[in-house]
Image: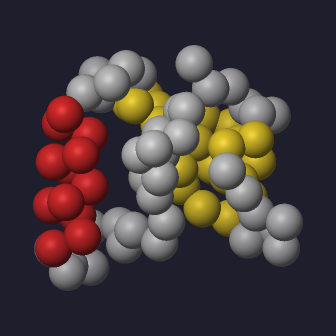
Amino acid sequence: MANPGDRVGRYLLGPVLGSRGQGTVFLATDDSHCEYALKIPHEADPRFLRELNATLVVASAHVAKVLDFNLEREPPFI
């Protein structure tokens, strides 16, 4: 389980923005102090990969753009 203050890849996790059944979204910053929303699943779930694939295909002002992801590391993130 990831927590505020943890480092995930190049991101430092900040406060939790929201948490639902599939995962938790954190406000995260990189070394340049740019802010991102970083989603980490609660557990290994094939729906997380399906969500990533769907998000990469859909282009809409109502869907967050995926800028980075890594499903190989622990914890995986979008």
Q: Residue at x 15, y 61 (%)?
A: 54
Question: Toward which corner of the image does residue 30 lie, by quadrant?
Answer: bottom right
Q: Is residue 75 visible?
A: yes
Q: Nearer the viewer, residue 63 or 44?
A: 44
Q: Residue at x 26, y 40 (%)?
A: 48
- Across and down, in percent, residue 22 comes to 30, 28
In the image: residue 70, left or right of residue 7: left
| Residue 45, placed above or below residue 14 | above
The quadrant in which the N terminus is found is top right
- Across and down, in percent, residue 42 comes to 41, 22
Q: Is residue 25 visible?
A: no
| Residue 3, placed above or below residue 17 | above
In the image: residue 39, left or right of residue 33: left
Q: Residue at x 26, y 79 (%)?
A: 61
| Residue 36, placed above or below residue 13 | below
- Across and down, in percent, residue 3 comes to 68, 25
